[in-house]
Amino acid sequence: MPTLRQIEIFVRLAEMENMGEAAMALGLTQPALSQQLRALEGRLGLRLFERVPRGMQLTPSGRNILEPARDVLRANRDFRDTADHVAARLAGSIRFGVTPTIGPYLMPGVIKVLHRRHPDLRLFIREGIPALQQAELAAGELDMILSPMPVRGRGLHVEPLFREPLRIVAPPDDPLLSLDTLSEADFSGRTFLTLDHRHHYHRQLSEICEQLGATILADYEGTSLYTLQQMAGSGVGLAMLPELYIRSEAGGLDGVRIAEPAGWAQYRSVAAAWRANAAFAGLYAEVAQVVAEEGRLD
């Protein structure tokens, strides 16, 4: 029978589609990952992946068993959680997934509150792409995630927490800031900086740019909001920053100024999610409530 480790390797490689990145995420060398994958394929009598120019791609057989493999990992995690719950042990740690457009400026306050309430609780925070983390949550590789909505996944409880305004920023010498009143037409033809196209941020910015008649800088994708802020301040393009980031110690408006059309009211909705049948669902709900309180703008 395949081992749980082999199943975990299969699922992670299916999600990342890159042998080197999957090995790094799993704490393995690439040769060790390849060896385990060959052993799994040998035990199953199936070829699960094929090489393509961009990395690794599931074969039809691999696609057919991917969801059952996730079910196995999810069941294993739920079994361990339930055993701890029956033994009346508080979860010693929470594997917490968060997007880099939220975590760096919101989680420090959350951690302080939780540490006061539960000194022995440890949050292991992993930043990543929301869509990938939703799959990791469903598979039992994460316990809880914080993500822009929508959050999708079989068997997940999704708890909407707060709505966060999104602000357009420009360098201080941008012509937009010399106008008494801005309209959407003033942004026509302008260029916005963005993050990795897999982020919800990128998709939402694409919709906003279409509304404004603006475009996204095609040959640059930032790695963090701070990077976008610095690039915008240097005049490379406009940027969109969340309100909580602007108000935080990690963010601010250093080098940029807010420049928005009259009546601007764009925002994103943020939610927490965990597996609906998780043994520690009550604890996760408490964590979600703390996040919601930290995210309030009043």
Image (cartoon, rainbow, N blue to C red):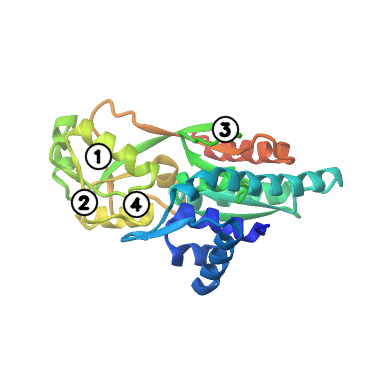
Whichever of callouts 4 and 2 sits on the residue coming sooner in the sequence is 4
Separation of residues labelled 3 and 2 (CA atoms): 33 Å
**Left or right: where 77 falls relative to 228:** right
The furthest residue to the top: 263
Residue on which disc 2 sits = 218
The foreground one among 23 and 171 is 23
Whichever of callouts 3 and 4 sits on the residue coming sooner in the sequence is 3
Element at label 4:
loop
Contact, CB < 8 Å: mark 4 with mark 1? no
Element at label 3:
strand
Quarter location, residue 17: bottom left
**Left or right: where 257 falls relative to 298:** left
**Left or right: where 79 falls relative to 63:** right
The foreground one among 269 and 16 is 16
Residue on which disc 3 sits = 158
Q: Is residue 30 above or below residue 139?
A: below
Residue on which disc 4 sits = 196
Contact, CB < 8 Å: mark 1 with mark 3? no
- Residue 275 location (% of width, % of height): 63, 38
Choose mark 1 or mark 3, whichever is in front: 3
Residue on which disc 1 sits = 259
Whichever of callouts 1 and 3 sits on the residue coming sooner in the sequence is 3
* Disc 4 crowd, CA 10 A, few/some/many (<14, 14-19, 20+): some
User: Residue type at mark 4?
Assistant: Asp
Whichever of callouts 1 and 2 sits on the residue coming sooner in the sequence is 2
**Left or right: where 231 falls relative to 30:** left
Element at label 2:
loop
Choose mark 1 or mark 2, whichever is in front: 2
User: Residue type at mark 2?
Assistant: Ala
User: Residue type at mark 1?
Assistant: Ala
Separation of residues labelled 4 and 2 (CA atoms): 11 Å
Contact, CB < 8 Å: mark 3 with mark 4? no
